[in-house]
Image: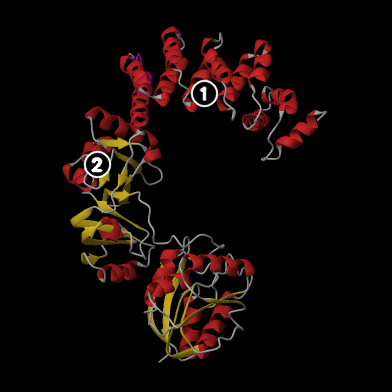
Amino acid sequence: MSDAASVLELLADPSFTPGKKHFPELFDVLCGEDAELSLRALRALSAAQSDLAKAIDRRLPTAEPIAVSRLVLLASRAATRSPRLDAIVTEGLLHASPIVRKAAADAIGRAKLPAVDALRAAFDAETVPGVRETILGALGKVGGAAAFDVLAGAKPTTRRVAKVVERARIIARRDEQRDVPSQVDASATLDRAVVVFRCRIGLEQILREEVAGLPGFVGTHVEDAFGPGAVTTTFSGKVEQLLRVRTALGFGFPLAPLDRALGDADAVVASLSSAPSLAIVEPLTRGPLRFRIELPSGKRRALLWDVASRLEADGSILLNDPRAAVWEASLSARPDSERFEWCPRIENPRFAYRSVDVAAASHPTLAAALVRVSEPRPGDVVWDPFVGSGLELCERSLAGPSRALIGTDVDDAALERARQNLAGAGATASLFRGSAWSFLPDQPVDAIITNPPMGRRVLEGRDLAGLLANFVSRAAGLLAPKGRLVWMSPVPDATREAARAAGLRLVRSSDVDMGGFLAELQRFDLP
């Protein structure tokens, strides 16, 4: 490498990992005036497998404060750690420039270097308010008993410093308890717990029917208080049974509406800390009760810190720890009320078969809904003409026995992904490369279950209504007597009319949110 142009060429490659021969030129870029190129050089040098300490030491004596702050940051982020690199960072706390001292404290906090004594000494000697705040924040991130002692003894001089100390104490408490494992116990038993299942909007009735047919559930209904896409029920049984509902996106345990008269932070704390709230989460949690708050967009981030600090001050068993949370307190906002739901963050085995995907493929809960509407029968020959990643066939195989599963697609890559997913589901299916408009099954089909391409992404510029209407007419001729076509139609009027003309009877329909546009779930039967 002989000129600056070659350095820029190397930095344009995200996979570039420099060696020692690259260091001089890269250090020039790191310490230069172009902030974007400096950041690229920092990323590249941080990944270097050679020890950077000597190269940094050669630069430090003559570097300007801004350059020194970047060298300190590099030392804290270097992939190959060494005692000298750590020392370069902590020595930055003693630099004459507050820019460097602030950068060093921030780097220690981000890297969680064991430098509490150095931070304590720097805090005692520091006179610049902004640097003192950064040192306190670094102590909170480093954590541990020693750091907590410093924070406990800090005397905030301004409201801003008080908030910094408060946040640092919260972070220190979080980190101190992370060594203790925590999880939601899926084997725990619920007794008449109110559960809210969430689903894609438009699938509520299908979800309700699924839940109503399972043991342990009493009285399912769609309730306006929880918004669209929600089904509530009362459940007695093990938590793991809730994980088996295939048409649900997830579930939670609702709390009473917030008391808005209390003010934002007080209302949240009162709700989450209430006896009914703790009676839900405490018996189901093994280890510290770590949680995160999920607020609708537009809510203030400062509110999260206010809630965390008030819980800390109250000595609550609730530990606001977004990075290691086992519960999510999700706020659902309605025009007339707001309330939290406790949603467990727990591994769900329902769709473990789904290892690969294709563009615009079905979501597995939608595939499960289509299968449920098809009313699976043991002797079914099932065809998915737009098989994609194979999720409809996977879900059909899991719903019960069939005589044959057939899938077709014009994309070889999609067929390979479908094979992988079907293998993961333990399903046996025959997959063929072919068009839905020309492939001819070797026997009458009892059920066609599919989610066809939705035009705007896959069939752009083509007559989608005409294509899908034509397929409906063709499907009618391939169905066995009492056969069913269950699918999503983005052009419902056209496909309804084509089905009527072909002698198919509309048995069921509902508008479903497909993520920005509606499609109609339709079931047509051949009399």
One can see residue 473 in this view: yes
In the picture, measured across the screen, residue 483 lies left or right of residue 152, that is: right
Q: Helix, strand, or loop for circle 1?
A: helix
Mark with earlier residue (2, 1): 1
Instruction: Report the residue at 62% width, 68% height from top.
Output: 460
Q: Residue at x 45, y 21 (%)?
A: 114
- Magenta segment boundaries in residue numbering: 156-163
Is 299 placed left or right of 467 in the picture? left
Look at the image and name its color scheme. secondary structure
- How far across and down, in percent of the image, does residue 77 sit? 57, 27
Compute the Cα span from label 2 to label 1: 35 Å
What secondary structure is the stretch in magenta mostly built from? helix
Which numbered disc, 2 or 1, marks the residue closer to the eye?
1
Give yes or no for residue 148 being in the magenta stretch.
Answer: no
Question: Which type of secondary structure does the marked residue at label 2 adopt?
Answer: helix
Residue 159 seen in the current view:
no
Query: For the N terminus, which image quadrant?
Result: top right
Q: Position of residue 90 (x, y in %)?
A: 52, 16
Q: Is residue 159 magenta?
A: yes
Residue 107 numbered tag:
1
Nearest the eye: 257 or 83: 83
Q: Which residue is mark 2?
A: 272
Q: Residue shown at 56%/83% (left/top)?
A: 470
Query: Is residue 239 toward the left or the right of residue 4 in the image?
Result: left
Give the percent coordinates (x, y) of residue 101.
Answer: 52, 15
Dot 1: few (<14), some (14–19), or many (≥20) neighbours within 10 Å? many
Q: Within the image, what quadrant is residue 261 found in?
A: top left
**Looking at the image, which residue is at 24% across and 66% down?**
221
Pick the residue in front: 303 or 124: 124
66 vs 409, nearest the viewer: 409
